[in-house]
Image (spheres, rainbow, N blue to C red):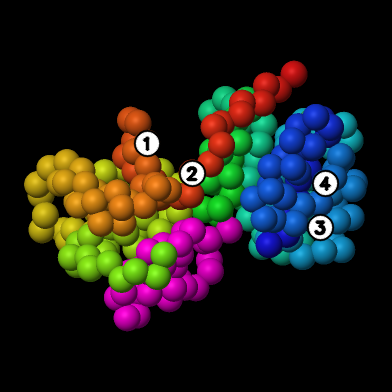
Amino acid sequence: MRLLVVEDEKRIADFLERGLKSAGYAVDLAGDGAAALNLVHAADYDLIVLDLMLPDIDGFKLLEKIRDRTAGPPVLILSARGNVDDRVKGLELGADDYVVKPFAFVELLARVRALLRRGQPAPEKLAAGDLALDCVRRRVTRAGETIDLAPKEFAILEYLLRNRGRPLSRTMIVEHVWDMDYDGLTNIVDVYIRHLRSKIDDPWPVKLIHTVRGIGYMLDLPEKPAEPVPER
Ligand code: CA
């Protein structure tokens, strides 16, 4: 996966480059609109992270130019301009997501991953660390050990894994895993997560299912705490 980061502030550009590279992506940097356009025409990117306030062109104009050519890769706007008008304009011009500075890197990374996952065929085998899930054979292993899951537990785990790194609300989980006839409480999710944890997390030192306060749950390998980056 190859990402283009369009950002004129070197400190933020370097921070993004370091973080995204350590998350396993190839990263190119462009410090202004002209450099960004050259790179977009020369290379095939899987995603563009776009700052709006650039020295030579407004980021919205640049987005139009990028979108002019092709449908192109997904674009995530990363900007200190956080008002509703800017967000709406960005999305109307074809951006796929909008993150406001200052931002937590883990959140940015989660959104980058979600965008990159979009549009790809659903893989048959999912994994996080030593946890592996085979969607076709309906088999789950951790560190090579087979784990028996009830159908709903399997469905929740599959949903968490397909959205790895992305916090999912209880409502999203219920809507995804239970059918439309279910009109009970969303705290049934907590009950099932407890069962899942006892099977896939409790016996191992590295925990994969995380409670996201105020939202719900997320599955991922533990990451370093968020480092907020202030925009000058
Ligand atoms: Ca800027």
Q: Nearer the viewer, mark 4 or mark 2?
A: 2
**Residue type at the position of mark 2:** Pro
Q: Secondary structure at mark 2?
A: loop
Looking at the picture, how far across and down is residue 58, in whole percent?
A: 79, 35
Nearer the N terminus, badge 4 or badge 3? 4
Q: Which residue is mark 3?
A: 40
Identify the residue at horizontal 54%, vertical 32% (top origin).
225
Looking at the picture, how far across and down is residue 18, in whole percent?
A: 74, 42
Inter-mark Cα distance, 4 to 2: 27 Å
Looking at the picture, how far across and down is residue 191, in whole percent?
A: 16, 46
Q: Which residues are drawn in magenta? A: 116-142
Q: Nearer the viewer, mark 4 or mark 3?
A: 4
Viewport quadrant of the C terminus: top right
Q: Is mark 2 within 8 Å of ligand 1?
A: no
Q: Which residue is mark 1?
A: 212
**Residue type at the position of mark 1:** Val
Q: Which residue is mark 2?
A: 222
**Residue type at the position of mark 4:** Leu
Proximity of marks 4 and 2: CB atoms separated by less than 8 Å: no
Q: Nearer the viewer, mark 3 or mark 2?
A: 2
- Against 231, residue 87 (above or below) is below
Q: Nearer the viewer, mark 1 or mark 3?
A: 1
Q: Nearer the viewer, mark 1 or mark 2?
A: 2
Q: Which mark is residue 29?
A: 4
Q: Is mark 1 within 8 Å of ligand 1?
A: no
